[in-house]
Amino acid sequence: MKDEIMGIRLGRHVLGLAAILFGVITLTWHDFNGWQQIPFAKVSHNITLAYMAAAIEIFGGIAIQWPKTERTGALALSFLFSVFALLWIPRIAAELLIYDRWGNIFEQLSILAGALIVYATFSQSDFRQPVLLARIGYYLFGICVVSFTLEQYFYLAGTASFVPKWIPPGQMFWAITTTVLFALAAIALLSGRLALLAARLLTLMILGFQFLVWLPAPFTDPHKMINWAGNAQNLAIAGAAWVVADFLNQGISQSKAGV
């Protein structure tokens, strides 16, 4: 029974739920520029493209929930978020010294990394390609955590403003603390030392952002798309971090079993 419980991979379900939420938000606002900020705002086919993105998000989010379609869903989400990431490149090239542009592409890549790991770890093949793809996704996510650290460091005052004022001892304290924790998580993931513990604690911290920062946001202003999109984005990154933890736990379980 214990082995069956340990074999459950919850990360993909969280990632899929976030994708469905993205799709619903996109359909509701007829736009996907609330978070991805895709440079199609003035394109005549913007609504058509938004509906296409929403369809992929909802399809991928639902498909990834079930073992028979998990790989297909992960592939659909990998494709979509790789496109979202690539579309940030022109903005980075135009504003090379503004780290926010880099931070946004790495946020998209972190979700892509989670989807890649799900796609790779589902494979029953004995070939090396799925293992390699999973490792690529893992290290890509680790690099993204480095970016999360830098983004909070460069925009520390902005990060502090997101912290609810009622949480002691103060907003700046938690901005600095979470930045340090991101840095420690990045070191652990990329070095492999205490990586599973780091992935689990990182997941908990990002879920903490969800409950303390993003979930209350729509109640403050339900008509503001960013408040809903922020929930989807944060949940997707939390899901990706959870996928990484599941991947590491699976590797440890297999090593103990002599697989």
Image: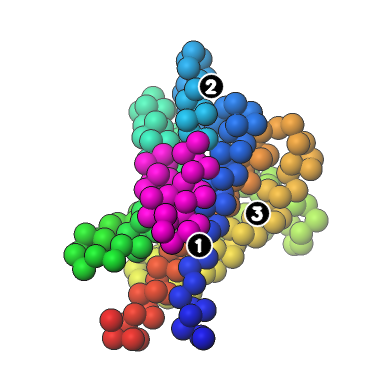
- Are the residues at dot 3 and dot 1 in contact (C-beta closer than 8 Å)? no
Location of residue 166 by image quarter:
bottom right
The correct choice, above or below, for 128 with respect to 95 in the image is below
- What secondary structure characterizes most of the magenta part? helix
- From which residue to which does the magenta span run? 55-81
Disc 3 element: helix
Q: Name which residue type carries label 2.
A: Ile
Mark closer to the chain start, 2 or 1:
1
What residue is rendered at 41% in x and 39% in y? 80
Disc 2 element: helix
Query: Residue beneath label 1, please?
Result: 11
Q: Name which residue type carries label 3.
A: Gln
Question: Whole-Å distance between the Cαs marked 3 and 1?
Answer: 15 Å
Location of residue 210 by image quarter:
bottom right
Disc 1 element: helix
Q: Nearer the viewer, mark 3 or mark 2?
A: 2
- Relative to the observer, which residue lies in front, 70 or 28? 70
Mark closer to the chain start, 3 or 1:
1
Q: Is residue 201 visible?
A: yes
Label 3: how many Cα within 10 Å (few below 14, some 14–19, many 20+): many
Label 2: how many Cα within 10 Å (few below 14, some 14–19, many 20+): some
* Residue 2 falls left or right of residue 133: right
Residue 177, x across and y down, in percent: 60, 61
Query: Residue beneath label 2, please?
Result: 47
Label 1: how many Cα within 10 Å (few below 14, some 14–19, many 20+): many
Residue 58 lies in magenta, yes or no? Answer: yes
